[in-house]
Image (cartoon, rainbow, N blue to C red):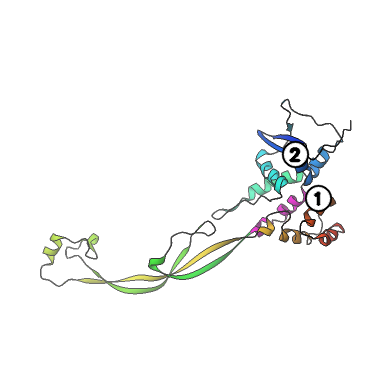
Amino acid sequence: METEAHSPSERVVLRVGESQYFTTVGTLVEKSQYFKSYFSGAWPIEKEEDGSIFIEGDPHAFDYVMQYLRRGTFPLAFDVQRGHNYSMYSRVLEEAKYFQCPLLVAWLEDACYNKCVTWRVKTTIQEATELASSGNGSTRDPKFSPYSKCAEKVYECPRGILGHRGGEACGRKCRKAQGNDPREFDTESTIEKWIVARTEYLPHLGWMTDSGRDFLAHLATRPTLDMNPGLCERAFTSRRMKALLCYLLLF
């Protein structure tokens, strides 16, 4: 039995697994063909006793789908030390296909997450006293290579105690053992300068949302893209790229 289409401002509660999502019809239908059909009024919607709507899906992956539906942000899962979470991307892709989110599907299928973060290796020469042992949140721990060495004389304890090497730890017994004998030194090679290589990661915001300039330009290179014209128009108008929209709809 056909019913009236739901108002975009209508508030709804979705239940996916044990998770609940409080949102509006407008948020759900803007970027999802699944929800656009679901709330079109073509059939009645069954609700749970508490008024929520049960949706079959992976609750962990659906979190990322919901974030996308709300703000158009893609699910970048990147850590400087571990890299990308490809398992998560795979799960979200299946949910994006099920809920028919064409731009999210395109971003995941084309591995656009690899474009969101790039890196470069920056090398510097530093004095040993200037070295930093770690980077910040956008760099990996640096790697060190010797650059230049210097010879240095090091005092040897007259009692042969390695822990006294350098003379700072020698006490009364050592001085007594030294007596009037000349002090003995050993020549030791030390590194005075290091080559420091740091890997820096650079974020590219144009790939992180469905209205990002880089992502929209990428869509023009796709041979096919199954999307509804209304959704595309909203995304492309935000960047004044109606010409690009027309190009896509022709192919």
The magenta span reads 100-116
Which quadrant is the C terminus positioned in? bottom right
Q: Is residue 211 left or right of residue 39?
A: left
Q: Position of residue 24 (x, y in %)?
A: 75, 39
Residue displayed at 80% across by 52% down: 234
Which quadrant is the N terminus positioned in? top right
Is residue 96 visible from the viewing direction of this image?
A: yes
Q: Rounded to the nearest whole Å, what is the CA distance between mark 1 and mark 2?
A: 17 Å
Q: Residue furthest top?
A: 49
Q: Earlier in the sequence, mark 1 or mark 2?
A: 2
Q: Which residue is mark 1?
A: 231
Give the image quarter of residue 113.
bottom right
Residue displayed at 55% across by 66% down: 121
Q: Which residue is mark 2?
A: 24
Q: Secondary structure at mark 2?
A: strand
Q: Position of residue 118 (x, y in %)?
A: 61, 62
User: In terms of secondary structure, what is the magenta stretch mainly?
Assistant: helix
Give the image quarter of residue 100.
top right
Taking depth in this image into account, of 7 and 60 the one nearest to the observer is 7
Residue displayed at 66% across by 60% down: 115
Q: Secondary structure at mark 1?
A: helix
Q: Position of residue 140 (x, y in %)?
A: 52, 59
Task: Tell me the kind of residue under disc 2.
Answer: Thr
Q: Is residue 188 left or right of residue 177?
A: right
111 drawn magenta: yes
Q: Is residue 119 left or right of residue 44?
A: left
